[in-house]
C-alpha cells in the first residue's frame, strides 16, 4: 500500500531549510556579516569560541534595527530589501530572502542587542525557533547591532559531529572575513578568539586595498601585484572589472583560492578560475599558482543571484564572452610584464641588502627544536628554562609613544645664555644680532670650536703629535685620526644640528648666541619627496666592494641581528646598547654597528642618496675654508687647506652625482677656493641626521685620507668617511675645567645630556635598530663588539643553587 502524502511539521521544515543555508559556522558568519555591510557599517568585530560552534558574536556600528521590527526579526521571509519578485532584477544588497537569522534561530540560541540613532537606549531580546522570547529589554549600547549566536547545531547532533575541529572552523571564518576585508573599502574588520588579547585579523577602516591584501595574504603577495582595470562593455552588460592579480615575480607553491566578487557578492566561479589559471601557465614556473582578486560589476538584470541556498554561486548572461574578454585582457597585461623578471641573488649586489643564505627565525621555539632533523623532535616538551618569551617581530609599546625630547627643563636650557661660549665652527658663525655686552665678555676667551677640539683631542695629541711634511701639509697618524673620530662627539652641547630636507627643500637654522641647545628637537624634520628615477650603477669597483661585504659577512651574527629584540640604551658615553636574541642577552657597541650599517647603506644606495640641504643666514659660515680653519691642526696651515679645497673643487661633479655632496660658490663670478661652500650632505637614513660637530674632521679626512687616484679606493674611502660622519655622537656630562666653578654651566650640561640621551634612545629603538634588522650583514670584525652577558638556562642554574 503506497504511503500517504502529508504536510511536514513546521518545526521540521524550518530545520531542513536551516540545514541547507547554515552548513557550518562560517555560513552563519557570512550571512550576518553581509547584513552588517548592508546596514552601512564602518567597523565589524567578530569574537568566536571553539571555531564559532560554542559562541559566535558579530558587532557593527551600522544603522541598527527598529524596536518595532524585533518581533518578526527571526521569522522566515521577512526582509527590508525586497518587496516583489521583480526587485531581484535590480537587487544591490547582499541579503534579500530574509532567511538568515530565521535559519540560525532554529539551530542555535540567538540574542540580539540593537540601537538606532533615534533611540535613547539599546534593546536586547533573545530568539528560539524563529520566535521572540519575551519583550525587548532596555540596555546600554552603542549605535548598531550585536548578534550573539550560542551552541550552534545543539539540536542537530549529526550535523554537529560532521563539523571539523574548532581551529579548522575558525580558519574558515578568518579566511572569509579576510576576503570581504580586501573587497570592502572604508570598512574595518577584526576577528579574534574569546579570551585572546591579540586579534587574528585587524584591518582599519581607512586602510588601502594594497595594505588589506598584505595583512590578509602576506607581504609576499602584496609586493608582487599588478592592478587590473577593464573598461565597460555595453554589449555584454559588463560595467567594470577591477582587481589585483600576481605579477610574474610571484612564486607560491601553495594554491590560494581566487577571490571573485560579482556585484559585490563573494562567489565561486570555476569557469573563470580555470581560464585565468590557463593564462598563467604560459608565464609562471610549473607548480606555481597565481593570486587572483577580481571584482565584476554586471547589470543586475543579467545576474541571477538566487541559484544557491548559501548564495555561493550566481549565474549571469554572456558568461563565456565575459570570461574570454577578461582572459584576453589579462594575457595582454602579463605579456607587458614579461620583458623583465626579478630574481633574488642573495647578496649585496642586489638593490637591498639580503642574506647570502636563508636565515631562520628563532623567536618562537627553542634552538634545539629548530635544529631538529625530524618532526618528532618538534613535539618535545619545552622546559621553562628554554622557553623563548619574546617575539622579534612584535612592536613594543614604546614605539607607539611620541618621545618627549622637549621636557620642561629642556625648555629652560634652550633659552639660557652662557656668556663664556661662542659659535661651533669659528668666528664666521657669529650672529650679528648679538649685543655688544656679550661680545665684550667673550673677547678674551678661546673660541668654542677650539675648546671642543682641544678637549676631544687632548689625550690623543699628548701621545701622537701632528707633524708637517715637506710640502707644508699636515699629517696625523691613522691611530690619531681614529681616536679623534671616536672622541670628537664629546663636545659641548653647543654643537649645531641642521634640520634635514630631501633634495630641494631647505630648513634654515639660526645660530643663537651662547645657548646650550639651538635646535628645537621636538619639531619633526621637513622632508620633500622628489620624483626621481633610481640610477642603475654598473661600476665594477662598486660591485667588487659589495662582493667583499658579502664574503666578509658572518652568518650566525647576521642571524642574531636579523631577529633581535631591542632592550635599551646602556651607556651613551661608551655607545653601548643591549639586545636580546632567543635565550641570550647581548651587550653591543652601537657605534661599531652603525659604522658598518651606514657603509653598507652607502654601497646599496650608491648614487641614489637623499640630500640634506644646509642653510644658514650667513653663507660664509658654510665655506669649506672656514670649516677647516676651525680644525686646530689646520688653523695656521693655509697650504694644506688650499690643497684640500682644490681637490674637492676638482671632484665636485663626481661628489654631487655619486654622494649628494654638493659644493658651490658664494660668488658665482669669482670661483675662489675661499668661496667654495658646502651646500649639502647625503641623507642615508630618514629621521636620522649626523652630528655636524664632526664636519671639520669629515672634510679633513676626505681631503687627506682618500686616495683620489684609484677609483675603487676613492669610492671606498669616501663611503667610509660618510659612515664615520654618521656614527652617533658620544653623550657625556663632563664639564670643562674652566667651567667647574660655574654651577649654572654644570646644571645646563647635565640637563642637555639627559635630553640627548632621550633622543638617542628613541633613535636607536625606532630608527637605527629596525634598519639593522631589515638590511644589515654583520661582518666578522663585529664579533669583538658583541658580548653575551646573560642567558636564560644559565640564570636558572644560578637561582637553583640559591
Image (tube, grey):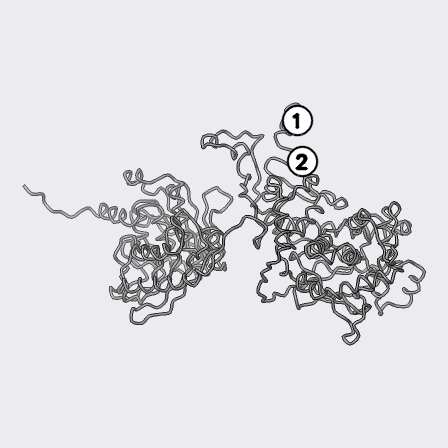
**Of discs 2 and 1, which sits in the foreground?**
2
Within 10 Å of disc 2 (Cα), the crowding (few <14, some 14-19, many 20+) is few
Q: Which residue sits furthest left?
A: 1
Are discs 2 and 1 less than 8 Å apart at CB?
A: no
Helix, strand or loop for disc 2: strand
Q: Between residue 731 and residue 282, name the one nearer to us.
A: 282
Which label sits on residue 170?
none
Q: Quadrant of residue 410?
A: bottom right
- State the residue position of label 2: 788
Q: In the picture provided, is 720 more to the left or to the right than 85?
A: right
Residue 124 is at least partly visible in this image: no
Instruction: Residue 603: give x, y in percent of width and height.
Output: 64, 54
Residue 11 is at least partly visible in this image: yes
Q: Between residue 54 and residue 219, name the one nearer to us.
A: 219
Which label sits on residue 798?
1
The image quadrant where one finds the N terminus is top left
Q: What residue sits 28% from the left and 63% below the top?
A: 303
Q: Between residue 632 and residue 511, name the one nearer to us.
A: 632
The image quadrant where one finds the C terminus is top right
Q: In the picture provided, is 516 more to the left or to the right than 420?
A: left
Amino acid at each position: 500500500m503506497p504511503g500517504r502524502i502529508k504536510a511536514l511539521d513546521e518545526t521540521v521544515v524550518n530545520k531542513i531549510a536551516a540545514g541547507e543555508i547554515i552548513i557550518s559556522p562560517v555560513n552563519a558568519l557570512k550571512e550576518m556579516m553581509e547584513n552588517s555591510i548592508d546596514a552601512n557599517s564602518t567597523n565589524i568585530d567578530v569574537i568566536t569560541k571553539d571555531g564559532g560552534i560554542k559562541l559566535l558574536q558579530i558587532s557593527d556600528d551600522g544603522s541598527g534595527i527598529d524596536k518595532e521590527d524585533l518581533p518578526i526579526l527571526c521569522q522566515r521571509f521577512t526582509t527590508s530589501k525586497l518587496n516583489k519578485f521583480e526587485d531581484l532584477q535590480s537587487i544591490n544588497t547582499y541579503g534579500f530572502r530574509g532567511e538568515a537569522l530565521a535559519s540560525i534561530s532554529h539551530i542555535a540560541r540567538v540574542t540580539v542587542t540593537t540601537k538606532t540613532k533615534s533611540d535613547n537606549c539599546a534593546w536586547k531580546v533573545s530568539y528560539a525557533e524563529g520566535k521572540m522570547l519575551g519583550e525587548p529589554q532596555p540596555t546600554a549600547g552603542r549605535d548598531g547591532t550585536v548578534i550573539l549566536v550560542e551552541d550552534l547545531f545543539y539540536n542537530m547532533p549529526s550535523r554537529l559531529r560532521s563539523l571539523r575541529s574548532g581551529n579548522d572552523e575558525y580558519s574558515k571564518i578568518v579566511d572569509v572575513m579576510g576576503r570581504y576585508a580586501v573587497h570592502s573599502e572604508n570598512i574595518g574588520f577584526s576577528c579574534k578568539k574569546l579570551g585572546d588579547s591579540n586579534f587574528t585579523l585587524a584591518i582599519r577602516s581607512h586602510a588601502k586595498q594594497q595594505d588589506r591584501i598584505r595583512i590578509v595574504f602576506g607581504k609576499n603577495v602584496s609586493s608582487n601585484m599588478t592592478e587590473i582595470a577593464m573598461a565597460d562593455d555595453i554589449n555584454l552588460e559588463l560595467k567594470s572589472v577591477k582587481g589585483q592579480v600576481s605579477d610574474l615575480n610571484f612564486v607560491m607553491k601553495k594554491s590560494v583560492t581566487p577571490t571573485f566578487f560579482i556585484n559585490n557578492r563573494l562567489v565561486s566561479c570555476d569557469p573563470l578560475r580555470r581560464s585565468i589559471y590557463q593564462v598563467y601557465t604560459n608565464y609562471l614556473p610549473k607548480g606555481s599558482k597565481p593570486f587572483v582578486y577580481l571584482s565584476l560589476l554586471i547589470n543586475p538584470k543579467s545576474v541571477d543571484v538566487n541559484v544557491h541556498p548559501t548564495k555561493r554561486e550566481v549565474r549571469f548572461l554572456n558568461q563565456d564572452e565575459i570570461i574570454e574578454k577578461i582572459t584576453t585582457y589579462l594575457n595582454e597585461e602579463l605579456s607587458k610584464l614579461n620583458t623583465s623578471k626579478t630574481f633574488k641573488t642573495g647578496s649585496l649586489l642586489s638593490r637591498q641588502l639580503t642574506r647570502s643564505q636563508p636565515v631562520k627565525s628563532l623567536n618562537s621555539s627553542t634552538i634545539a627544536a629548530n635544529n631538529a632533523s625530524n618532526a618528532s623532535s618538534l613535539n618535545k616538551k619545552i622546559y621553562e628554562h628554554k622557553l623563548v618569551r619574546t617575539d622579534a617581530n612584535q612592536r613594543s609599546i614604546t614605539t607607539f609613544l611620541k618621545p618627549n625630547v622637549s621636557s620642561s627643563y629642556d625648555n629652560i636650557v634652550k633659552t639660557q645664555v652662557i656668556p663664556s661660549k661662542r659659535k661651533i665652527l669659528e668666528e664666521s658663525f657669529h650672529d650679528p644680532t648679538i649685543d655688544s655686552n656679550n661680545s665684550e665678555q667673550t673677547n678674551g676667551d678661546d673660541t668654542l670650536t677650539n675648546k671642543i677640539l682641544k678637549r676631544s683631542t687632548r689625550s690623543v695629541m699628548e701621545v701622537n703629535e701632528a707633524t708637517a711634511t715637506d710640502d707644508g701639509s699636515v699629517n696625523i697618524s691613522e691611530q690619531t685620526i681614529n681616536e679623534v673620530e671616536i672622541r670628537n662627539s664629546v663636545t659641548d652641547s653647543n654643537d649645531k644640528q641642521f634640520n634635514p630636507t630631501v633634495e630641494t627643500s631647505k630648513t634654515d637654522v639660526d645660530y643663537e648666541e651662547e645657548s646650550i641647545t639651538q635646535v628645537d628637537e621636538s619639531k619633526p624634520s621637513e622632508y620633500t619627496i622628489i620624483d626621481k628615477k633610481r640610477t642603475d650603477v654598473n661600476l665594477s669597483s662598486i660591485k667588487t666592494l659589495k662582493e667583499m661585504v658579502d664574503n666578509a659577512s658572518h652568518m650566525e651574527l647576521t642571524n642574531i641581528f636579523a631577529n633581535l629584540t631591542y632592550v635599551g640604551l646602556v651607556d651613551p658615553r661608551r655607545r653601548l646598547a643591549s639586545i636580546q636574541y632567543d635565550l641570550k642577552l647581548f651587550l653591543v657597541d652601537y657605534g661599531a654597528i652603525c659604522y658598518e650599517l651606514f657603509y653598507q647603506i652607502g654601497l646599496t644606495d650608491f648614487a641614489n642618496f637623499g640630500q640634506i640641504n644646509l642653510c644658514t643666514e650667513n653663507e660664509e659660515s658654510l665655506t669649506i675654508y672656514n670649516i677647516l680653519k676651525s680644525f686646530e691642526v689646520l688653523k695656521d696651515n693655509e697650504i694644506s687647506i688650499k690643497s684640500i679645497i682644490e681637490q674637492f673643487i676638482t671632484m665636485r661633479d663626481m661628489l654631487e652625482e655619486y654622494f649628494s655632496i654638493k659644493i658651490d660658490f658664494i660668488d658665482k663670478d669669482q670661483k675662489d677656493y675661499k668661496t667654495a661652500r658646502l651646500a649639502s650632505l647625503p641623507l642615508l637614513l630618514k629621521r636620522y641626521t649626523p652630528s655636524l660637530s664632526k664636519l671639520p674632521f669629515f672634510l679633513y679626512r676626505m681631503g687627506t685620507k682618500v686616495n683620489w687616484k684609484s677609483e675603487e679606493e676613492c669610492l671606498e674611502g669616501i663611503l667610509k668617511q660618510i659612515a664615520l660622519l654618521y656614527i652617533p655622537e658620544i653623550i657625556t656630562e663632563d664639564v670643562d675645567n674652566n667651567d667647574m666653578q660655574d654651577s649654572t654651566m654644570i646644571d645646563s650640561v647635565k640637563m642637555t645630556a639627559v635630553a640627548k640621551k632621550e633622543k638617542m634612545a628613541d633613535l636607536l629603538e625606532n630608527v637605527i635598530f629596525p634598519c639593522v634588522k631589515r638590511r644589515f650583514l654583520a661582518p666578522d670584525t663585529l664579533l669583538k663588539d658583541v658580548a653575551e652577558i646573560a642567558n636564560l638556562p644559565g640564570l636558572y642554574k644560578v637561582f637553583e643553587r640559591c
